[in-house]
Amino acid sequence: MAESRTWSKASMTAQALGRIDPVTRAIVPPIHVASTYIRDPDNAYSSGFIYGRPDNATIRDTEAVIAMLEEAQAGALLFSSGMAAATACFMALEPGDHVVASAVMYWALRNWLVTEGARWGLEVELAETDDLAKLRAAVRPGRTKLVWVETPSNPLWTITDIAGAAEIAHAAGARLAVDSTCASPFHTRPLALGADIVMHAATKILNGHSDVIAGVLAARERDAYWERIGRIRSGSGAILGPFEAYLLNRGLKTFFVRAAAQARSAATLAERLSHHPLVARVLYPGLPQHPGHDVAARQMENGFGFMLSVQVKGGEQAAIGTAANIRLWKRATSLGGVESLIEHRASIEGPGTPCPPDLLRLSTGIEDPGDLYADLDEALSAAHR
Ligand SMILES: *Cc1c(COP(=O)(O)O)cnc(C)c1O
């Protein structure tokens, strides 16, 4: 009886799968820092480890936790950053392949796609993937090899129907990859919804403490494409360092409590700010008036995430002024950490951004939600005096 019981993801994550170091019985496994491993006298490598660039035991420990979270049959691969993970998915394609990506998505990846991705020979088409009819019109059967979707997507939190996008991609002979950074495994299970690959900037809420740059991919099927991605990581030296992998594993132990608290706070803030006299609009998929709310309610679980944006009355100067007057929130880029961050997003994205100039992006941390609201309320007033 007891052996057949399976524990919840929350329990498994809290204990990093319950692994115990076989040598010392330590409850926290050691950090494997070796760059190289002893070859056996018979010329074999009986441990399976040869050199630090392709693989590492500390990396594997952390990958196993994320593979469990994502229900990834083929496992997970950790990369030196979210961008390294994402770009490996595109570098595993052939020059001439057609790819469709969300028009509203993480700015740096969008830039990479239309510059370096195009130089790689990819034909990149941006589509409003939150409208499945537009996605269907953008894919070219037989020519499109990868559909890349970010949901909720930066910084408007548009929602793409993952199951619908998977059906469209697969019917055209393409794979579906989902950047699930802002949903996190707490809210969305892209592989269970039909995606082939899920990607996270583990820099964000998976690590949760703003002290690691890391990325991860997890896959449903161990096919030739997934193996090529592994070779790209190894060949380009894009594996995560063991210290970062350890920190990420440590951060993951509190992932469920952090994600729950952050989502609860974000929902409270979104609701309260939507009635604020100096706020023109709140963008949060949990609000019934958000254009993606119905799809989000269907495909997200445990709430709607920790990210929201507000459009401030008075335009760009009022938005920048609000950020300037903030005290508890930290004025910084990035997201998903325990400390709440505020950012005037158009300033960092620069010319050509689809981000409205009056928009502030909010990453909700674990501080007292009453304090977070009061700080925003005072900063909004100060900017409008
Ligand atoms: C931060 C982020 C990335 C890139 O991750 P890095 O670790 O900074 O390279 C990609 N996608 C989303 C949605 C992100 O927020």
Image (cartoon, helix red, strand yellow):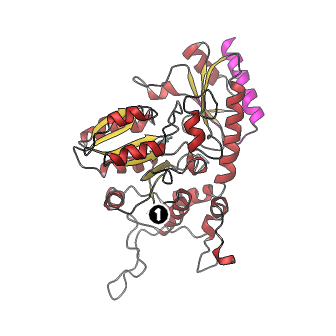
Q: Residue at x 64, y 31 (%)?
A: 287
Q: Is residue 336 visible?
A: yes
For label 1, the SS is: loop
Q: Residue 49 appears in which quarter of the rendering?
A: bottom left
Q: Position of residue 103 (x, y in %)?
A: 41, 32
Numbered range of the magenta stretch: 361-385
Q: Nearer the viewer, residue 130 or 314?
A: 130
In this view, the residue in front, 340 or 171, is 171
Is the N terminus in the top left, top right, bottom left or bottom right quadrant? Answer: bottom right
Query: Quarter of the image containing the C terminus?
Result: top right
In the depicted structure, whether residue 251 falls above or below residue 347 = below
- Dominant secondary structure of the residues highlighted in magenta in the image: helix
**Membership of 269 in magenta stretch:** no
| Residue at the image position 31 percent from the left and 41 percent from the top | 99
Q: Is residue 361 above or below residue 79?
A: above
Q: Residues within 10 Å of mark 1 (few under 14, many from 20)?
A: some
Q: Amino acid at mark 1?
A: Gln
Residue 324 is situated, as x and y percent measured from the top left of the image, at 63, 23
Up-down relation of residue 178 to residue 384 (above or below): below
Q: Residue furthest bottom?
A: 42
- Residue 358: image quadrant is top right
Total labels: the figure holds 1
Name the foreground residue: 120 vs 9.
9
Residue 371 as seen in the image, left or right of residue 329 = right
> Residue 347 at what x, y percent from top left?
49, 25
Mark 1 residue's CB less than 8 Å from ligand 1: no
Residue 89: x and y in percent read 36, 50
Name the residue that disc number 1 marks: 73
The residue drawn where x is 46% and y is 40% is 150
Residue 26 visible, this angle: no
Q: Is residue 91 left or right of residue 250?
A: left
